[in-house]
Amino acid sequence: MSNVTQTDRDAPSLDVESDWNCLFVGGEWHTPGDRETITVEDPSTREPWTDVPAGTVEDVDAAYDAATKAQASWEERNPAERAALVDRVHDLMEDNEEAIAELLQTESGSAQLKSTLEFQTAVADVAEATTMPSRAGGDVRDSTIAGKENLVKREAAGVVAVIPPWNFPLHLAIRAVAPAVALGNAVVIKPASETPVTSGLLIGKLFEMAGAPSGLVNVVTGRGSDIGDRVAGHPDVDVVAFTGSTEVGRHVAKQAVDSLAFPAMELGGNGPNVVLEDADLDNTISGSAFGSFAHQGQVCISINRHIVHESVYDEFVAGLVEKAELLPTGSAHSPATFVGPIINESQRDGILEYIEETVEQGATLETGGDTVPVDGVEDSLVVEPTVLSDVSNDMAAACNEHFGPIAPVIPFSEDEEAIELANATEYGLAASVWSGDRNRAEDVADEIDSGMVHINDQPINEEPDVPFGGMKASGIGRFHGDAIIEELTETKWISVQREQRSFPF
């Protein structure tokens, strides 16, 4: 049986050369011991980079025990103390930007632009979290009973499980961890197996360096198939913050609900990009290319389908092809790269299969459709930016969340048809509409069933004080701002009878 009660190693340092083969539980770093280990590969080189322990159910239990013990006293700290801890994490991140960016490039295949944008977004999330302790106050409500005062208070939910994905590992983990801690909760992180450092161990290290109490933030690396159910369904969990596919999210949510924990779920997407005939086409094509090909399309809010008016369809396709063919591709370690490697072989093969199947269904391959050779790599994970024309909504690359650098382009003739095409999916996460007429664009945006719609901009947008989340099968609840405060706290009503009340018996 695994034993995580014994301190048996020094903490890792914040760089790619550090030994990250450890768990972080109860404020202590632990070697794998008798556990199996999971090898983490650099997607650019296909070479092993580090190993991490394959955590066990016993490790999860130890993490929840430590979190539960730490949380009670942490919630009693005054708001300024909690904000100060998160603020120190913010400063540490800024002081170590270069090292963190290198970790993102090495572990998640993030090109330099993407790693910079992710870092900036994560830092902004932490800065926003520093304001939350003073914003999570209550309210006083009038009573229908004479002499009564109604107090509505907010208290920390308790222990928050954070289960982030591998595509934006730091940002999508810390956007839940930092607010949870700021609001008086303790945290158990189950990082993504592909990115256990940047979605978990790195965050544990930052909070340790900032002086977090032992057990406040815990990190248990491991396979979801081994420990995922225990993390999401633990008797001591109060909120489960999960980001990932809808298929996995449904299962995670069931585990959480069985433990009567709140499931905060940001799930899959199939983002429509609606281009009306009066759009500024040059700007639209530039934004559309970014929305399809940023981080190799491995973005839940990326453009999955371009829905383009028939009168500008050919010009749009030609312009998108030109952009796709100009984009620098290759290793994430090259500063020039925009489109880097897919996270792993399985994901890459699935993307190539979507392209092949869509062409077999009648689409035209305008450009791309294959892998890009990378020097020194036998089996490259870099997929060419791919544009497909003559696409219909039911073709493989359009009806599925392809999660790759694929741009299927679908024609339409009337606004109503564009809206119908945009909504013909189980998902409703992010969308975009381009038009020279703001009122018309807003009319179309209002009719699209999506939690977020961007007018005259691509959909890869996220701001720390604006609610982020989806409709339909794209999730439950919202991250950021006041929305995440509500999800990470419990509401308590306390009534005070100030004047003696008469009773009927």
Image: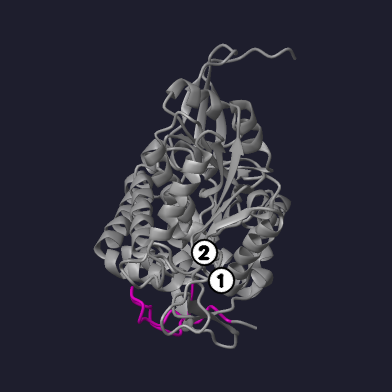
Instruction: Tell which circle, 1 or 2, labels the residue nearer the N-terminal end.
Output: 2
Residue marked by disc 1: 193
For the residues bearing labels 1 and 2, Cβ distance under 8 angstroms: yes
Helix, strand or loop at disc 1? Answer: loop
Position of 385 relative to 433 (above/below): below
Question: In the image, residue 173 lies at what x, y percent?
Answer: 48, 58
Residue occupying image coordinates x 36% and y 39%? 134
**Magenta span main SS:** loop
Question: Toward the viewer: 282 or 174?
Answer: 282
Residue marked by disc 2: 166
Question: In the image, residue 311 lies at what x, y percent?
Answer: 53, 33
Q: Amino acid at mark 2?
A: Trp
Judged from this view, the residue extending furthest toward the bottom is: 34
Position of 82 relative to 58 (above/below): above
Residue occupying image coordinates x 63% and y 56%? 245
Residue 65 sits in which quadrant?
A: bottom right
Question: In the image, residue 345 lies at what x, y percent?
Answer: 58, 74
User: Quick check: is 14 in the magenta stretch?
Assistant: yes
